[in-house]
Image (spheres, grey):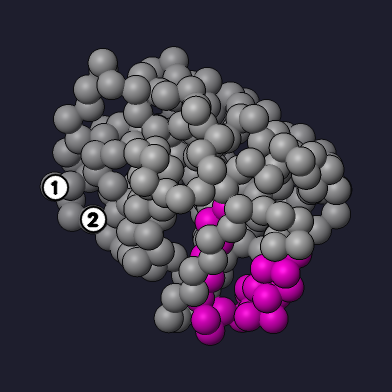
Amino acid sequence: MKATGAQVEAAICSTQTTAELPITLFAPVHYERNYAYPLVVWLHGPGDDENQLKRIMPVISLRNYVGVSVRGTNPCKSASGKPGFAWAQSPPHTALAEQRVVDAVQAAQGRYNIAPRRVFLAGFDCGGTMALRLAFSHPARFAGVLSLGGEFPVGGAPLSCLTAARRVPVFLACGRESQRYPSTVVCDNLKLLHSAGMDLTLREYPGGHEISPQMLADMDRWIMDLVTGKSSRHDNTG
């Protein structure tokens, strides 16, 4: 999943850390200020932080997107004991996550030329679950939502805006041997999303609970198909 040092250096990565808004920004190689770029808003996995974007974006694409990542709302530790953050699903944490995402999008728009109808929300594990929750709750804000190894959110009426949420395409990815997001839960989520009439793409990959290069390559293709109109899905981004 790692890009070369030269690739990362060729892109522009910057960290803007304040108590209110700890974010990392990514600009593509050969950034063109007269072109309105799609924006990928990345919600990191548990035990990580906003700097995960620096490892993710160069593998997704060095040229296609501006990226922004914001820190999770709940301090925790990684599997190795390193301090990090996660995305708790309680109402107070959800409200804080929503505000951080809104502020992060505004920060990206203030620095780079962003296509306002091409904002994609994505995340891994609990970040993917939070991405689904926020996209379904505020569907007018996002052109699509992607969850890598993050299950459908439970509690808090995530489909309370169902009619509007059906207009947001969903990309769901999982590892076949994942213990955190096992196939039984994947199947339950698939049935629920289909019964809700959601526009869903499900991809399964070899391996366990991890972000693979193939996941990120498919993420790039899925988003670009929507951006360019090559997808057969209804494009709600106009």
Q: Amino acid at mark 2?
A: Ala
Is residue 152 depicted above or below 7 in this figure?
A: below
Q: Amino acid at mark 1?
A: Ala
Q: Which residue appears at 38% of the width and 68% of the height?
A: 212
Instruction: Report whether 117 appears left or right of 163.
Output: left
Instruction: Report whether 114 appears left or right of 137.
Output: left
Which residue corresponds to mark 1?
6
Distance between the Cα atoms at labels 1 and 2? 8 Å
Q: How many marks?
A: 2
Residue 211 visible, this orientation:
yes
Q: Which mark is residue 54?
A: none
Instruction: Report whether 53 appears left or right of 31.
Output: right
> Horizontal and vertical percent for residue 171?
53, 56
Looking at the rendering, in which quadrant would you find the N terminus? bottom left
Region of the chain picked out in magenta, as a range = 170-192
Is residue 63 depicted above or below 172 in this figure?
A: above
Who is closer to the viewer here, 36 or 213? 36
Q: Bin the neighbour count of mark 2 within 10 Å (Cα to Cα): few under 14, some 14-19, many 20 and up.
A: some
Q: Which residue appears at 53% of the width and 70% of the height?
A: 174
Residue 49 visible, this orientation:
no
* Callout 2: SS: loop
Which residue corresponds to mark 2?
3
Residue 39 occupies quadrant: top left
- Assess whether residue 158 is covered by the magenta stretch: no
Q: Which residue appears at 35% of the width and 28% of the height?
A: 37
Who is closer to the viewer here, 195 or 32? 195
Q: Which residue appears at 80% of the width and 58% of the height?
A: 154
* Callout 1: SS: helix
Residue 206 occupies quadrant: bottom left
Which residue is situated farthest in the left direction here?
6
